[in-house]
Amino acid sequence: MRRYDHWINGTLTPPTQGRYLATIDPMTEQPWAEIAHGCADDIDRAVRAASDAFRTWRSVSPSARADLLWRLGDAIAEAADELAALESQDAGKVIREVLGQIRGLRAWYRYYASCAYHAEGRQIPHDRQSLLVLTSREPYGVIGVIPPFNSPLLLASMVVGPALAAGNTVVVKPPEINALSLIRLAEIAADAGIPPGVINVVTGTGSETGDALVRHPQVRKVCFTGGPESARMVLTAAAPGLKPTTLELGGKSANIVFADVDVAHVVNGIIAGIFAAAGQTCVAGSRLLVHSTVADELISRIVERAGRVVLGRPTDPATEMGPMSQPRLRDGALTRIAAARQQGAEVLVGGAGAPVPDRGWFLAPTVVDGVTPDMAVVREEIFGPVLSVLRFTEEEEVIALANGTDYGLAAGIWTHDLGRAVRVARALEAGTVWINTYRALTYSVPFGGTKQSGFGRENGMDGFLEFTEPKAIWIESSTEQLGDPFTLRT
């Protein structure tokens, strides 16, 4: 098996303690590579390298930073086949989606490159004419980046790109079950001209390597993508250092279908919302809230299409859904499905016993009808291909159902009534609302959640500003003697 070391200060660096972790192929259920098992000493070396690099990187002109990020985007796109193959095999995600994501990163990095020109301050009017009051936007310094396993290169880039554009440096702790593409990212960045120490990657476990990164005194801000329980540990570790954090967490997103839709048109949107990436996406539309007058027809069409989803090796272009990334996620989903069935729900397709390939951590696309809002399959994020169906009749009723969750990441609305679409979108407690589409994401639109889905934003100018702090600068132009030195000037 090939071994992958850390990337620290522009070079591949073996782990201090000589330890390695096996990374498992979800299709074969066997180890296929090893990654360095980082410790606090490895993190310390990486953070110190990033801190040293920050002194010069923040002074690099916006044009030069933009040029380097532009070149990095080109280099990633040119290496897309290699990077996609790594992610697909490491986490079981179908090659078609991964390849599309990574090829598209050229445009994402070009947008982030443009952000380097927009760390803009402002001039604030003051009653005293001799005072000129300005603000500037300043980079934090070293940013700790902890992305998730489902799309590590894309989701890490949503932090790394704007962080570097603003003049920060980064230390990335990849997910231990899908780390290889981020190690290659660091090597590609070096070839594209990114200076040593600006991007560092230290692999290992969350409990050891990730914790050491969050706690390191020279890390100025932490950006974490994952689940609420892990986020609480991140916040606990960040609290002694009073470090700001950006948390992009999970969801239990509602896909709402009103009675006036073209049912045949809606089906693919529902299918894409829950079964793409085997349901392992934070915005998965795992709750279908459908008007009772169109429920039977829509559910019948969804069940028929779900039963035809092609399961198989994720690197096969014909595969529509690969295995789940981890057996604990598959088993957790099956446990909730079984509990719902015991409570009176009906599994219309999928679940335990559904046909799946003989090898691999597969869970067939599953639709559970007859659920109630208090069931675990409806309340808890499953992170798997499991759709729960609830019926409604009134607009106020469906808004209450949609908002009746601890999460607030995303939601979908399907209707031809523009007034209803606007009313419901405004009433939903979610960071993103899609109308007559689902699971759309791009670099220029802010993304993030509320409630247990986290705080802060990624992408767009809102996301870029997460990587800068405002500094107020007061300039007195008068030569007159100051007044009472013991009185605050306002």
Image (cartoon, rainbow, N blue to C red):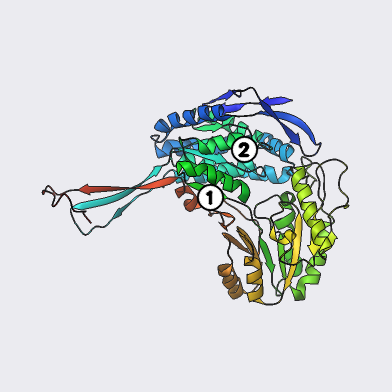
Q: Nearer the viewer, residue 21 or 133?
A: 21
Q: Is residue 143 above or below residue 375?
A: above
| Horizontal side of residue 7 vs 468, given as left or right | right
Considering depth in this image, is 213 or 103 the residue closer to the camera?
A: 213
Quarter of the figure that contains the N terminus:
top right
Mark 2: secondary structure: helix
Above or below residue 256? Residue 172 is above
Residue type for callout 2? Ser
Residue 249 visible to an observer of this rendering: yes
Give x and y (percent) for residue 12: 59, 24
Q: Label 1 is placed on what type of residue?
A: Glu
Image location of residue 400, percent across then percent down = 63, 71
Q: Which residue is identified by label 2? A: 207
Q: Is residue 225 visible?
A: no
Q: Earlier in the sequence, mark 2 or mark 1?
A: 2
Q: Quadrant of the C terminus?
A: bottom left
Give the residue pinned by disc 1: 458
Label 2 and label 1: CA atoms lie apart by: 25 Å
Q: Secondary structure at mark 1?
A: loop
The relative height of residue 461 versus residue 379 in the rendered view (above or below) is above
**Corner quadrant of residue 380:** bottom right
Alpha-carbon neighbours of circle 2 within 10 Å: few (<14), some, or many (≥20)?
few
Q: Residues within 10 Å of mark 1 (few under 14, many from 20)?
A: many
* Residue 138: image location, x then y, percent: 38, 43
In the displayed structure, does residue 28 sit left or right of residue 149?
Answer: right
Residue 357's x, y, as percent? 86, 44
